[in-house]
Image (spheres, coloured by chain):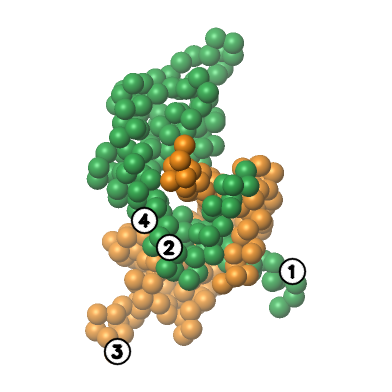
Chain colours: A orange, B green
Amino acid sequence: MGIADDAVEIRAQGWRTLAALHGLIDTALERALQAEHGLSVVEYTVLDALSRQDGWHMRMQQLGRATALSPSATTRLVNRLEDRALLTRVLCQDDRRGIYTELTQAGEKLLLAARPTHDRALHEALQEAEQVPELAVLVGTLGGVSAGV
Amino acid sequence: MGIADDAVEIRAQGWRTLAALHGLIDTALERALQAEHGLSVVEYTVLDALSRQDGWHMRMQQLGRATALSPSATTRLVNRLEDRALLTRVLCQDDRRGIYTELTQAGEKLLLAARPTHDRALHEALQEAEQVPELAVLVGTLGGVSAGV
């Protein structure tokens, strides 16, 4: 196997590790958030992203990046959360194309209730992942990752 | 903010970074594999995992771990791939509870055709992710992750 093949295999192995760790955490968060708050992981991600923005609003496009969803899937997700009165949409004054979303008081309240559940499930999922030899190294880098940015 | 709160926030930030990188790669692979080979990422993952097993067979439970799917979702996925004649199921001789799956020749052929597409799309997605400041550090650790295991 040549150097180029090695690089391809290293990338593929890195991706398999990333996907496996993502799956383990995502499954654990989904179970906890659905059971205790009727929220999916991606719905929690939207509420959390909105809450961390200056001025508490965000463009649809930015939300799409935060959730890794397509524009149409982002629109459907925002519609569902709007129907539940957890966020509202605002047309931007300066830019007629821009649609902003912001948390309602109910959205903020649900997020505050769900955050400890999310953080506890995440902590437990990472502890579980540390026991899996293939995942342990990547778990260890996550702290460093966030410290580095 | 205390040390305990810092740890919680570092974990949450690490998970957001991981989820964003996973989403970027997953979207790119899904687009390329569907367009060129009619395969989803998770279907490719199953064929790839089967091909890398000794003796070319794998328990359903192991497949579930590789794909991060629930037992019922794993069964549905294996059924779909069996209907397309890409894998077969074998009842284990030694263990009556164990059902093994293995690639067919057609499955092996499709995997060999799809692998360059997968590897190219992965390479391009990682190059794209390296341009995003929040993701660059994690992209950089993936090589080290696989080297460490």
In front: label 3 or label 1: 1
Residue that appears at 50% across and 19% down:
B55
Amino acid identity at mark 3: Gln
Q: Earlier in the sequence, mark 2 or mark 4?
A: 4
Q: In the image as oriented, which residue stretches furthest toward the right?
A: B3
Which dot marks residue B128? none
Q: CA distance from mark 4 to mark 3?
A: 37 Å
Quarter of image, res B132: bottom left
Q: Residue B70: in sight, yes or no?
A: no
Circle 1 is placed at which residue position?
A: B4
Chain of the residue that carries numbered disc 3 in the rendered image: A
Circles 1 and 4 on the same chain: yes
Label 1: few (<14), some (14–19) or many (≥20) C-alpha neighbours in 10 Å: few
Do the residues bearing badges 1 and 4 touch, measured as CB atoms within 8 Å?
no
Residue A46, position as x, y percentages in the image: 45, 67
Which dot marks residue A93? 3
Which dot marks residue B124? 4
Amino acid identity at mark 1: Ala
Chain of the residue that carries numbered disc 4 in the rendered image: B
Quarter of image, res A33: bottom right
Q: Residue B90: in sight, yes or no?
A: yes
Residue B136, position as x, y percentages in the image: 49, 65
Circle 2 is placed at which residue position?
A: B129
Label 4: few (<14), some (14–19) or many (≥20) C-alpha neighbours in 10 Å: some
